[in-house]
Amino acid sequence: MAGIWIIAETREQALELLGAGRSLAPDMGAALTAIIRKEAGPPEDYIARGSDEVLLLSELPPEAPFGAHLPVIEQEAKTASQDIILFISTARGKELAARLAARLGAGLCSGCTALAFDKGSGSIRMERLAYGGAAIQKLTSSAKPVIVAVPPRSFEPAQPMDGRQ
């Protein structure tokens, strides 16, 4: 089964990425996994909002950056079968996305404002602004996994879904 991962530092970021992931999951026939910090809220909240699985990152010392989780994320990514990994396109998010892409030998598309799955080709279609917003660049990736950084407020946050606990 295909997989979609979302990796977020905060609850707000995670809910927005869940919204993006939920828009892809039905067409892909994919499971949606949220990888979050323990401080980002109870896992049940993410399940209620559409995540099929929640992986909690261990607590870090206060002085440690979020990127200290990278070895654990990399190790898990090498054993899982995810098709797309979503990050929020903040300074830290873009850095972590780029480092993970390099370690996995995966493609990276930063600044994506729209995502879709093409059932015919099995590829992920992405759009991002180009030339300072004067044009839209359309990209397609058939490589797996593809790592995508989404600018904040590009997608609606996931809302609770009936019948999910």
Image: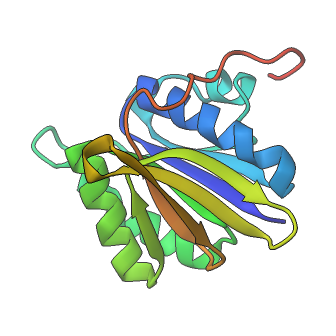
Q: Residue furthest bottom?
A: 105
The quarter of the rendered structure image containing the C terminus is: top right
Q: Can residue 118 be seen in this view?
A: yes
- Pick the residue in front: 30 or 133: 133
Q: Which of 162 and 148 is in front in this view?
A: 148
Q: Quadrant of residue 79?
A: bottom right
Task: Please say if 18 is above or below 76.
Answer: above
Picture coordinates of residue 120, whole percent (x, y): 87, 69
At x 63% / y 28%, what residue is drawn? 46
Q: Which residue lies furthest to the left in this view?
A: 63
Q: Position of residue 90 (x, y in %)?
A: 27, 42
Which of these two is toward me, 122 or 145?
122
The answer to whether any part of residue 60 appears in the image is: no
Q: Residue drawn 71% across and 30% down?
A: 47
In-image side of 68 versus 140 (left or right): left
In the picture, measured across the screen, residue 90 lies left or right of residue 87, that is: left
The answer to whether residue 86 is above or below residue 154 is below
Residue 116: x, y in percent?
A: 69, 51
- Is 119 above or below relative to 149? below
Q: Name which residue lies at 82% across and 56% down.
A: 28
Q: Which colour scheme is used?
A: rainbow
Q: Looking at the image, how many numbered discs can be counted on the residues?
A: 0
Image quarter of residue 59: top left
Q: Pick the residue in front: 23 or 13.
A: 23
Residue 136: image location, x then y, percent: 45, 50
Quadrant in the picture for residue 123: bottom right
Q: Residue at x 48, y 79 (%)?
A: 106
* 20 displayed left or right of 103: right
Quarter that holds the N terminus: bottom right
